[in-house]
């Protein structure tokens, strides 16, 4: 398994390639980002740390440096499928391949994507499905060096790892799929930025009800906290709100 140790992304690749030259100019040094390690834990272990995990130059030319999670967290919640919480959304790709590698998921699978964004930017880097299935180090390297937060899904559509993709990015689609029962071998890929203030035109109750219906019925849940797109405090409140609605016991760390 990967993500055993904290890692610093210093190359001009992955998320660190975004506005790299502008950031270098502002920082007066080579930009770098931190990738946290993963732990087994509870909702209480989903906490923000002090390291910069995402950085971008906004439309006004200002550097936006975003602190991410202290650790990625595998949640073990009774009666729910495996849930993994991380900061930047491209990390989902690795955890999908980890589940495939362990036999917890089968390819091709259905992806249910609930997010403020499509995350379907073009990615010209080819992903070797068989190699990623067998070699998780390769899957980790592809995730962190060849993908960013906006283009990690397309490689799996190209190599047919994802059979179908349901996009829940607006009120119409959320309403349409609020009672949808997904096939068991599917993945729910949730971005907490669906609760960002600019998405308040979609009633929160509709979002929660849709999540509550889909989440228990899939094989794997990947949740991105997306610090550039939603403030840490709000993201944590919405994460807890989601699971409060399940009225389930969250076991303590073993």
Image (cartoon, rainbow, N blue to C red):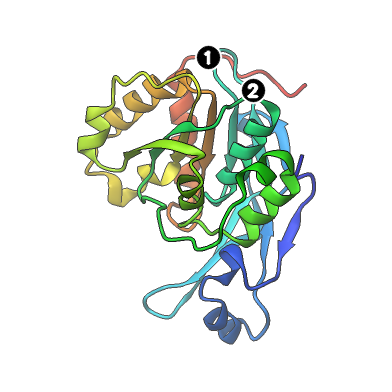
Q: Earlier in the sequence, mark 1 or mark 2?
A: 2
What residue is at 52 percent from the left and 82 percent from the top? 22
- Mark 2: which secondary structure? loop
* Residue 45 seen in render: no
Q: What distance separates the C-alpha of mark 1 from that of mark 2?
A: 11 Å
- The residue under label 2 is 76
In this picture, is 157 found above or below 8? above
**Which mark, residue 214?**
none
For residue 104, what is the image quadrant?
A: top right
For residue 32, what is the image quadrant?
A: bottom right
Q: Quadrant of the N terminus?
A: top right
What residue is at 44 percent from the left and 43 percent from the top? 191
Q: In front: 21, or 237?
A: 21
What residue is at 57 percent from the left and 63 percent from the top? 15
Q: In front: 231, or 90?
A: 90
In this picture, is 87 found above or below 182? below
What residue is at 52 percent from the left and 70 percent from the top? 18
The image position of residue 127, as x and y in percent, is 59, 52
The image position of residue 251, as x and y in percent, is 66, 18
- The residue under label 1 is 248
The image position of residue 231, as x and y in percent, is 46, 52
Tag 1: Cα neighbours inside 10 Å, few (<14), some, or many (≥20)? few
Q: In front: 40, or 19?
A: 19
Tag 2: Cα neighbours inside 10 Å, few (<14), some, or many (≥20)? many
* Residue 132 seen in render: yes
């Amino acid at each position: 398994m990967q993500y055993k140790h904290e890692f610093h992304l210093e190359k001009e690749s992955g998320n660190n390639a975004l506005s790299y030259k502008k950031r270098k100019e502002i920082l007066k040094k080579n930009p770098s980002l931190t990738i946290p390690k993963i732990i087994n834990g509870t909702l209480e272990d989903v906490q923000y740390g002090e390291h910069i995990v995402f950085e971008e130059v906004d439309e006004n030319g200002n550097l936006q440096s975003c602190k991410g999670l202290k650790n990625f967290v595998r949640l073990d919640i009774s009666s729910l499928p495996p849930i993994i919480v991380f900061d930047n959304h491209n990390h989902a790709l690795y955890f999908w391949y980890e589940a495939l590698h362990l036999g917890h998921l089968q390819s091709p699978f259905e992806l249910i994507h609930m997010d403020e964004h499509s995350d379907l930017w073009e990615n010209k880097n080819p992903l070797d499905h068989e190699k990623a299935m067998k070699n998780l180090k390769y899957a980790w390297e592809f995730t962190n060096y060849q993908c960013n937060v906006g283009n990690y899904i397309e490689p799996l559509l190209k190599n047919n790892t994802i059979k179908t993709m349901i996009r829940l990015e607006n009120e119409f689609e959320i309403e349409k799929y609020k009672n949808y029962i997904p096939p068991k071998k599917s993945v729910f890929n949730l971005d907490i930025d669906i609760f960002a203030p600019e998405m308040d035109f979609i009633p929160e109750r509709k979002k929660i009800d849709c999540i509550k219906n889909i989440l228990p019925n899939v094989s794997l849940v990947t949740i991105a906290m997306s610090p550039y797109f939603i403030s840490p405090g709000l993201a944590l409140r919405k994460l807890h709100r989601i699971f409060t609605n399940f009225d389930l016991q969250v076991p303590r760390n073993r």
